[in-house]
Image (spheres, rainbow, N blue to C red):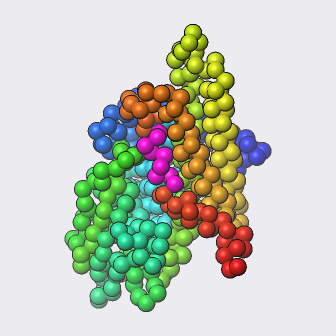
């Protein structure tokens, strides 16, 4: 994966530069408008699909690019340096939408869904969280699926589901109780009778991404839509979330680095007391700390990704990467806003968006508290 601990392979570096240029030249000039209008950026997503970003870790035989999960992480980081809404759209579509079908799906399910998901023509979503159950996913789950003849009949509600209500959303993997102490995942195509998508949430951040509540009322899908083995849904989403935490860590690093990027430009232009404000040690120290946080968090997710691709256990490293990167994003967004002063409070400047977007990284795909629990358990402290 890496030629040294910190240097990318030529292939990965070429991808990184390509996405960096796309984010700078295509996303950055227009994303602020999408964000303020709370509008999903279909044209940007279309171009990302044409670049092959949605198929980065999916084999060519299924319509993907045949790359690896680390390539996806690099793309997420570069996009998040400019905007997190676009980055989370890609992350959720691949990590939560397509990858479970690739990892656990039948040949027929892969053939039906993966080519369109890998091309970005269609988005997938993962229906896990419920209104009454966040971190306590299994204990709080109330959605049920019962076999009736040749169909699953699904009833329940899912909350905070990314990519679930766009015009190009095609399928949602729904985690449901299918028996006593048994959770399974069932693929539900968009438009299925009994499957209702709510209006978009009014959110603090990620305003150019799609997040909705989903409800299922006697929603019937064929029994063949079961994803993987019956009763393995809990194990599936644990694996999915471990991988997703590495991806979210990459997004957090991108946001943290984006704060540094914006501050470096601003402190050369903004003058106070006869000098550019970057002349003053107080500002220099603040930006130095920001760069150190981003660098350290990047090493954490590189290490977690390396272990994941090597096929060795990486649960602890994924939790560390998620924890460290979300802290870095939140701290850097706060400091960047301070460096910008009053302008940092204005939505026309990217750091205003960064500040609003950072907080969810301490919550989504496992809260910071949950990451600490996972780390402690991996250290053998859970049974003391």
Please count the marks in the image: 0
Q: Position of residue 130 (x, y in %)?
A: 37, 69
Residue 255 appearing in the image? yes
The furthest residue to the front: 273
Determine whether, in the image, residue 197 is placed left or right of residue 287.
left
Q: Position of residue 364 (x, y in %)?
A: 47, 58
- Residue occupying image coordinates x 56% and y 50%: 326
Does the magenta stretch mainly form a helix, a strand or a loop?
helix
Residue 68 appearing in the image? no
Determine whether, in the image, residue 24 is placed left or right of residue 194.
right
Determine whether, in the image, residue 203 is placed left or right of residue 318.
left
Picture layout, residue 57 above or below residue 205 = below
- Residue occupying image coordinates x 68% and y 51%: 300
Q: Position of residue 373 (x, y in %)?
A: 61, 68
The furthest residue to the right: 4
- The image quadrant that residue 114 belongs to is bottom left
Q: Which residues are magenta?
A: 354-362
Picture layout, residue 376 above or below residue 9 = below
- The image quadrant that residue 384 belongs to is bottom right
- Residue occupying image coordinates x 33% and y 86%: 147
- Residue occupying image coordinates x 43% and y 35%: 352
Q: Nearer the viewer, residue 109 or 70?
A: 70
């Amino acid at each position: 994966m890496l030629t040294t601990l910190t240097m990318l392979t030529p292939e990965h570096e070429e991808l990184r530069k390509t996405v960096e240029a796309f984010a700078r030249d295509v996303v950055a000039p227009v994303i602020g408008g999408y964000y303020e209008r709370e509008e999903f950026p279909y044209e940007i997503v279309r171009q990302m699909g044409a670049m092959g970003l949605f198929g980065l870790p999916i084999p060519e035989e299924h319509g993907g690019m045949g790359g690896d999960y680390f390539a996806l992480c690099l793309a997420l980081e570069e996009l998040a340096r400019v905007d997190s809404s676009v980055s989370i759209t890609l992350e959720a579509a691949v990590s939560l939408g397509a990858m479970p079908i690739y990892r656990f799906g039948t040949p027929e399910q892969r053939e039906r869904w993966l080519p369109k998901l890998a091309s970005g023509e269609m988005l997938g979503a993962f229906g896990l969280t419920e209104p009454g159950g966040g971190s306590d996913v299994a204990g709080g789950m109330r959605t049920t699926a019962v076999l009736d003849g040749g169909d699953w009949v699904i009833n329940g509600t899912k909350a905070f589901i990314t990519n679930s209500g766009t015009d190009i959303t095609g399928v949602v993997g729904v985690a449901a109780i299918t028996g006593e102490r048994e959770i399974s995942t069932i693929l539900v195509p968009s438009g299925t009778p009994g499957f209702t998508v709510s209006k978009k949430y009014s959110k603090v951040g990620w305003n150019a991404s799609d997040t909705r509540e989903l409800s299922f009322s006697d929603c019937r899908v064929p029994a063949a839509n079961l994803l993987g083995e019956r009763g393995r849904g809990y194990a599936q989403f644990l694996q999915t979330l471990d991988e997703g935490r590495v991806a979210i860590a990459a997004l957090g690093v991108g946001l943290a680095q984006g704060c540094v990027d914006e501050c470096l430009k601003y402190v050369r232009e903004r003058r106070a007391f006869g000098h550019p404000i970057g002349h003053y040690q107080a500002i220099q120290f603040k930006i130095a700390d920001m760069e150190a946080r981003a660098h350290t968090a990047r090493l954490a997710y590189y290490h977690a990704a390396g272990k994941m691709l090597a096929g060795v256990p990486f649960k602890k490293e994924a939790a560390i990467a998620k924890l460290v990167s979300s802290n870095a994003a939140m701290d850097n967004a706060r400091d960047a806003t301070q460096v910008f002063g009053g302008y940092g409070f204005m939505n026309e400047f990217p750091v205003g968006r960064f500040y609003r977007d950072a907080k969810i990284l301490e919550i989504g795909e496992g809260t910071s508290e949950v990451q600490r629990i996972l780390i402690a358990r991996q250290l053998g402290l859970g049974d003391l």
